[in-house]
Image: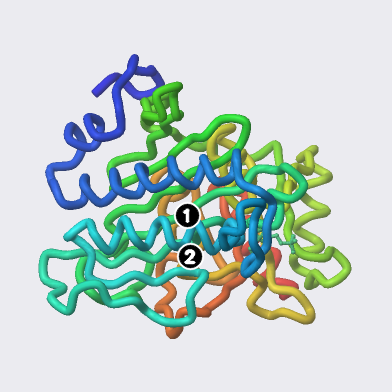
Amino acid sequence: MSEPGKTKFQVDLRRHLRETDENRDLTRLICEIADASKYIVHSIRTGDLGVAGTSNLYGEEQLALDVLSDRILQKRLSHSGVVANIVSEERPDIITVSTESAGKYSVAFDPLDGSSLVDVNLAVGTIVSIYEGGDVFQPGRNQVAAMYILYGPRSTLVYSTGNGVHEFAMNALSEYTLIRENVTMANAGGIYSPGGQRNLYSAGTESFVQDLEARGSKLRYSGGFVPDINQVLMKGKGIFMYPHLKNAPNGKLRLLFELNPMAFLIEQAGGAASTGRERILDLKPKSIDDRAPVFIGAKDDVARAEEFIAKQG
Ligand code: FBP
């Protein structure tokens, strides 16, 4: 491995995983997801902007990009030989790939988060969370790996297996090569990315945002969770929030598909992720649909959000 902060030239994802992680099945699983993402990239770049159930120019059935991305990932994972259960943001039920869960993994994913942003040509992403065994309702701290792929001007892949956070970019041969190893976050500030309607914020969240603004934080919000988190993580500063709202006490974002994997990555980079009252990774999921408010990013900023919420709700 290269020294923290230094880049290594042309190390591909498989080689990086082999060097950092001894488990061959986990390496295989992550590489399968990376391979699947190449087809998702292709669909985003070249696909007609069709809606599910309609036909394209050639009379073929058109699939909405999120449905297509879900099928691509599900197929790869089902044939990987290392997956027990799959749970997708696109489907209401758990998909059992193998009833024999010993030595296998369960995977939760959002195949194309923020897919409506494709219509206005903004960045979107795939988010993945991986657990050992067959239980998909484990607290996020049990994840053995988390990753996302960001489809922006470039396609980048960010993963952690609990040994730091590493960023790869897709090259002209559609291979992911290392661009940053051991990404880390500063303890505070600079940017804030606030989801949800501000006039529905609680008193605590409103005071926190005013405090951020008074400290000179700049607003950076695209409406895509993956690019918004990626900005905080790669700039190594700031905070993303989708708080509890007056009409939505659990916010909007989903624990299994969005919050747990991102919380794992941000904590691995030295940041923090909280509902405003407790650590995201300690929440025990009760259902596929669980949602929670989130304040995620620089450690001190998250702690300050918790202070405001403890005092003012
Ligand atoms: P969907 O589950 O409807 O795809 O929404 C997810 C998402 O688009 C996130 O990517 C983003 O952070 C958030 O919703 C934006 O929500 P809002 O439009 O309320 O700010």
Q: Quadrant of residue 121?
A: top right
The circle drawn on residue 142 is none
Please say if 107 is above or below 236: below
Residue at the location (21% across, 45% down)?
27
Q: Residue at x 68, y 57 (%)?
A: 50
Residue 257's disc is 2
Instruction: Quickly name the residue at label 1.
Output: 127
Residue placed furthest toward the top: 9
Q: Does the image show residue 303?
A: no
Q: Is residue 249 above or below residue 230?
A: below
* Residue occupying image coordinates x 23% and y 64%: 83
Query: Measured along the vertical axis of the image, is residue 304 above or below residue 170?
Result: below
Q: Label 1: few (<14), some or many (≥20) within 10 Å?
A: many
Residue 70 placement (x, y as % from top left)? 47, 62
Report x, y in % for residue 284.
Answer: 40, 78
Q: CA distance from mark 2 to mark 1?
A: 7 Å
Between residue 308 and residue 289, name the one nearer to us. Answer: 289
Number of dots carrying numbers: 2
- Residue nearer the viewer, 86 or 146: 86
* Residue 131: % across, % down: 28, 64
Q: Looking at the rendering, which quadrant does residue 275 occupy? A: bottom right
Is there a contact, CB below 8 Å, between mark 2 and mark 1? Answer: yes
Q: Earlier in the sequence, mark 2 or mark 1?
A: 1
For this rendering, which residue is in front, 58 or 140? 58
Secondary structure type for disc 1: strand
Q: How far across and how far down the image is residue 264, in percent?
A: 41, 54
